[in-house]
Image (cartoon, helix red, strand yellow):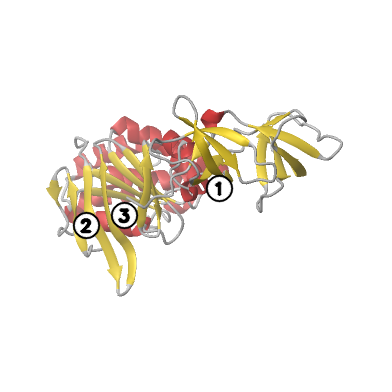
Amino acid sequence: MNASVPLTLKSISKRYGNLHALKPISLHVAAGEMLALLGPSGCGKTTTLRIIAGFTTPNTGNVLIGGADVTDLPPNKRGLGMVFQNYSLFPHMTVGENVAYGLKMRGIGAAERTRKVRAMLDLVRLSNFEDREIHQMSGGQQQRVALARSLVTDPKILLLDEPLGALDRNLRESMQFELRAIQKRLGITSIIVTHDQEEALTMSDRIAVMADGQIVQVGTPLDIYERPENQFVSEFLGTANIFEGTLAGPAADGYWNVRLALPNAPVVKVAGPKGLSSSDRVRIAVRPERLSIKSKDEALRARVRGVVFRGSYYAYELDLPGSTKPIYVYNSERTEAGEDGTIGLAWPETYAILLNEGGAR
């Protein structure tokens, strides 16, 4: 396998007439890192991947692989491996022939092809499947064949375009772990494009969240989930309860007192950056699993709209007076509402996220 190399994007952009499919973005992926491009349809993530692959020419900027500028090189000269959602396997070829195809195109001899193919099929747990027909393989097995074919040529960078989108949920979850284990074992620099938040959180070292042709936040899965910088990121990465309020002055140890914009205007303590001013309007995000149901004496009270059991927890949907959207709470135990149909809510201030509604990167 080739030594891991970094990937750098410098101010790349793409415009189709008046449509800015990708506004200028810059991004660095370290050698051996798995980075997820995550966002809704039309956000620019696939355009970014196509520019990296050489299928789309950017209007501005440069693509560097291992420090070398490859912006003007065709796809077959960039040293890339690619795995697509539909696998793009040749149905008239056996498993072994599919995996060996790239090696054959490079003029690798038959004996060396056989050695490399068998080694790669062993890596993806398909030993002894060399002579199997593609139509005899399950979806998960076909996905592994596609992965083996993309890796057998020792690419510098691995690009994965919605690689698990065609699989059912249970198989997709197991393949997330399997793909990640293979990537870490090989230490290959990898980019995965996905709109699946769970997939991005499970498989990547870092996530670049995209919206409207821009990167809006980059960070580790834990950073992105626990410390989203704006409302879009907080709501796209799972469910988030958004509370509006006004800064009521600094509290100790880097916290702020925030007066919530609710009828009884309770004051809560939230961690936040310096440089804010009292009376600033702010938004707070709290994950459903961080909210807890408390006693009837809590200042923040909500009426139970519905509750469902989801195996490991109960999901509550609540109406909060003064809020136009329902509030969601994930609680490990079933808790009955009081006589008035309401329950009290609270959360540790360390889990309340003061959102920054600044611009994109």
Residue 242 locus on image (x, y percent): 57, 45
Residue 34 locus on image (x, y percent): 33, 39
Which of the 4 quarters of the picture holds residue 293? top right
Write the residue at 48% across / 35% down. Answer: 226
Write the residue at 67% across / 48% down. Answer: 326
| Foreground residue among 155 and 51 | 51
Residue occupied by mark 2: 75
Q: Is residue 246 left or right of residue 12?
A: right
Looking at the rendered image, the disc whose residue lies closer to the viewer, 3 or 2, is 3
Q: Label 1, secondary structure: give it.
A: loop
Write the residue at 38% across / 45% down. Answer: 217
Q: Quadrant of the N terminus?
A: top left
| Foreground residue among 152 and 267 | 267
Residue occupied by mark 1: 168
Q: Residue furthest top?
A: 253
Q: Residues within 10 Å of mark 2 (few under 14, many from 20)?
A: some
How many labels, in total?
A: 3
Q: CA distance from mark 3 to mark 2?
A: 12 Å
Residue occupied by mark 3: 49
* Image position of 6 with respect to 90: above or below: above
Query: Amino acid under label 3?
Result: Leu
Q: Label 2, secondary structure: give it.
A: helix
Q: CA distance from mark 3 to mark 1?
A: 24 Å
Q: Residue furthest bottom?
A: 17
Looking at the rendered image, the disc whose residue lies closer to the viewer, 3 or 1, is 3
Q: Earlier in the sequence, mark 2 or mark 1?
A: 2
Query: Amino acid under label 2?
Result: Pro
Query: Amino acid under label 1?
Result: Asp
